[in-house]
Amino acid sequence: MVKPITTLGKYLMLMGRIFAKPERFRVYFKQYINEMTQLGIDSIGIVLLISFFIGAVICIQIKLNIESPWMPRFVVGYTTREILLLEFSSSIMCLILAGKVGSNIASEIGTMRVTQQIDALEIMGINSASYLILPKILGLMTIIPFLVIFSIFAGIIGAFCTAWFAGIMNATDLEYGLQYCFVEWYIWCSFIKSLFFAFIIASVSAYFGYTVEGGSIAVGKASTDAVVSSSILILFSDLLLTQLLMG
Amino acid sequence: MIQINNICKSFEGRSVIKDIDFTFENGKTSLIIGQSGSGKTVLMKCIVGLLTPDSGAVFYDGRNLTEMKKKEKQTLRREMGMIFQSAALFDSLSVLENVMFPLDMFSNKTYRERVKRAQFCLDRVNLLDAQSKYPGEISGGMQKRVAIARAISLQPQYLFCDEPNSGLDPKTSLVIDELIHSITTEYNMTTIINTHDMNSVMGIGDSILYIYQGRKEWSGTKDEVFSATNERLNNFIFASDLLRKVKKEEEKNK
């Protein structure tokens, strides 16, 4: 019980160091742009690919499992949209990003720690925590709503492809279902949730990387811990946020 | 001038540094020597403030580092340059960007002036041709020279080198030693080097502090080190067969 409390304390202390006034805004801004590219833009490919196939699979599964003479034909499109908007494109996509981006952040900062690059920053009089972590948090939080939009679009296109190319259902029914009873707030819910998740991914992974002690094995362990911890926290906060935003 | 008073440091009850006093003079290259595991790196980390000593004080020209607030420490650190054992260059930046980094952070010069200053520092270490390369593309010796260029880019008052010759061949080590020594006299810096390389001791050791198991065992100059009567120091220095033979030759000639 003591260890999780100690870890939480250290994490909060690190957060205190991160949100300090930058030494030079220009350098931090450059770093912020770099992080947006490295963490966000470079993830667009995997987000599109996964969302496309998941959208297609959701559409097929729903068609196969709930098709009944009593059920309106547009339900497949409606359910696909709701799943993509409410859970997949925010929560599940962020879980996937926790694996890709989280391990990247933890191993990058961890390697900087074991190769004394963080000590070098400290010796120069730079707040290393703020310089390394703040641009990552802000960069990921800026880019994640765009990734959510891309994910929703890719998922819907995937669903349409099952209608156009596989011919499992009528595209007009699917389109009607996708537009049926649309609630704009759900999109905002996705954005709000993804912002929280982005903060969790970047800050938790950076914490595990920043506090590495030892060598390459410790970096590997930090990377795994970062992914596991941020995934658990995403799932837990998803529960709370869903209740708060939709309850 | 850097003065250390009764520095003690322990980890989990194990004492690593015990009551060390010493004064590192301005414009001189001071060497901390000792066997591996004797506490040299811990002492240096205490001096630069990366570790907080359990007791004792470190004075930078009269300013007590151990009593400084975080902000004051950060300001003082802008007067420091450090060369790490592993060079600690930033992988994602080119050689020129690495040297420019402290200037980008703390200098008010224009971009062109910053590039000019970084190129001057690279030229000083004979690496102007490698400015567009990345740390992973250059040799260990070159990385150390880039680290020296980065350390002097803001013209620091104090230069710290943690085993700058480790992993380098004797010829490259000599080049690095000469470079550090000449920069120290040129900029009138206080330079402290951690080493167990006897070539460095003989070549550039203006003042030497020998540590044995975390304690100050002996201090003096490079001229005094070979005639010292301290048994532990002699065991350390003459562990090399070559030096033992040189000493025997000298004694015969006398």
Image: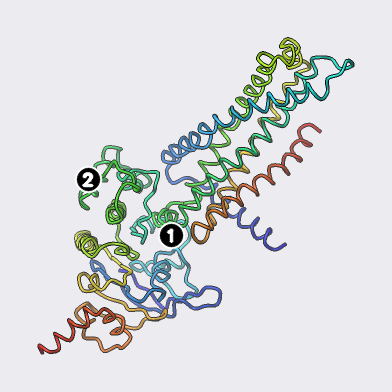
Quote the CA–CA distance across marks 1 and 2. Answer: 32 Å
Q: In this view, does A100 lie above or below B167?
A: above
| Image location of residue B37, percent across then percent down | 41, 74
Residue at point 33%, 69% (across, down): B194
Q: Is residue B161 above or below residue B254?
A: above
Q: Name the kind of residue labelled 1 in the image.
A: Lys
Quadrant hosting residue B39: bottom left
Residue identifier under label 2: B128
- Circles 1 and 2 in contact, beta carbons < 8 Å: no
- Local crowd at mark 1 within 10 Å, few (<14), some, or many (≥20)? some
Marking on residue B73: 1
| Image location of residue A196, percent across then percent down | 65, 39
Which quadrant would the C terminus of chain A be assigned to in this image? top right
In the displayed structure image, the side of residue B217 where residue A23 appears, left or right: right
Q: In this view, does A107 lie above or below A68?
A: below
At numbered mark 1, what does the secondary structure look like: helix, strand or loop? Answer: helix
User: Along the line of sight, which residue is nearer the eye, B109 or B250?
Assistant: B250
| Image location of residue A100, percent across then percent down | 57, 40
Q: Mark 1 lies on which chain?
A: B
Residue at point 44%, 75% (across, down): B56
Q: Which chain carries label 2?
A: B
In the displayed structure image, the side of residue A9 where residue B212 appears, left or right: left
Quadrant hosting residue A236: top right
In the displayed structure image, the side of residue A196 where residue A21 appears, left or right: left
| Image location of residue A89, percent across then percent down | 67, 30
Q: Name the kind of residue labelled 2 in the image.
A: Leu
